[in-house]
Every structure is written in C-alpha cells, then in structure tokens.
Image (cartoon, rainbow, N blue to C red):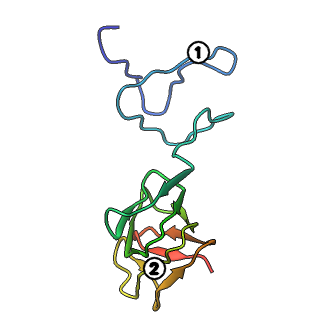
Amino acid sequence: VGEDIIPDGDNTRDLGSKSKEFKDLYIDGTANIDSLSADSFVKPTAPVVQTATSLKSSLVDVTGIHTLVLNSSKALSISGLAAAHDGQEITIMNIGSGAVTISRSTKASPRTIYGSSNITINQHQVYKFVCSPAQVWYAFV
C-alpha cells in the first residue's frame, strides 16, 4: 500500500472480524487505542521487580516497575516517586540491613508521598503506595 488507509467515517469500520482475524500486527510508533481486550499477555507491561543496592537520587523513577526491592547495608532515603501514570501502584520492600526512610509531605505536590510523618521501612518490611491523578502518592494503611 503506497498511501494511508483511512475509513470513510469515524468509528465505522473494522479491520478483520471474529471469524477472519489477522495473524500478527507490527507497529513502529504509537498505538492510540480507546480500549484493549486481550486473551492473554505474552510479556508483562513492566518488569515485575527491580532490585537496587543504592539510589541515584531521593526522587526515584518507578515508571517501569511494580516492585522495588532495596538491599543495602546503608540507610537510604526516598523523598518522591516519578510515576508512569495515575493509579500506578508500587510496592517497596527492604531486604537489606539499612533502614529506608520515606519522607512525606502535607503539601500534596506532584511526586511527593502524602502524610504528616515519615515512614521507616526496616529490614524485612514492605509498604505499598498508589499514585493519585494529581501525581501525589499515598501509602496503603
């Protein structure tokens, strides 16, 4: 095909059918899909677990993970989390001997963890956080 394939009206034509499906779809670029229905996922949408022995910054990029496992003998500090999207959940687990301090703020600024007192995650403890539409993180209680 030497030109764009454009239907004659918005939301009026299908590509394939229930009985005559295309085999594979290859796209190099952005797929803009209103909703997605799949029988199964061959590959997770993000790595399930990322393990770190140190942090590059106290603002931690969690855009591609679901679980952050920290394994350090030294104390680590987290002051904010960079989310992939609203509603993202992240589990932070400490398996190291150094405590992990989560700094919280009542200002509810984007990337901050909301709350009036800091959270200390000691060895063998786990906390879960969820990101709001305003990009503010909240701890599960």
The local crowd at label 1, few if under 14, some if 14 to 19, many if 20 or more residues have their Cα within 10 Å, is few
Q: Nearer the viewer, residue 55 or 47?
A: 55
Residue at point 60% right, 76% down? 140
Residue assigned mark 1: 23
Does residue 6 lie above or below 45 as drawn? above
Residue at point 62% right, 17% down? 21
Three-letter code for the amino acid on which mark 2 is drawn: Thr
Does residue 50 lie above or below 133 as drawn? above
Q: Nearer the viewer, mark 1 or mark 2?
A: 2
The local crowd at label 2, few if under 14, some if 14 to 19, many if 20 or more residues have their Cα within 10 Å, is some
Residue 41 percent coordinates (x, y): 62, 36
Residue 113 percent coordinates (x, y): 43, 77
Left or right, residue 90 beside residue 31: right
Name of the residue lying farthest toward the top: 1
Left or right, residue 57 beside residue 45: left
Q: In what element is the residue under mark 2?
A: strand
Q: How many marks?
A: 2
Residue 107 percent coordinates (x, y): 35, 86
Does residue 62 lie above or below 36 as drawn? below
Earlier residue among tags 1 and 2: 1
Q: Nearer the viewer, residue 50 or 75?
A: 75
Three-letter code for the amino acid on which mark 1 is drawn: Lys
Find residue 55 and report its image quarter: bottom left
Residue 103 percent coordinates (x, y): 41, 82
Does residue 98 lie above or below 10 as drawn? below
Q: In what element is the residue under mark 1?
A: loop
- Quadrant showing the N terminus: top left
**Label 1 to label 2, Cα distance in Å?**
50 Å
Q: Residue 101: which disc?
A: 2
Find residue 7 and report its image quarter: top left
- Quadrant showing the C terminus: bottom right
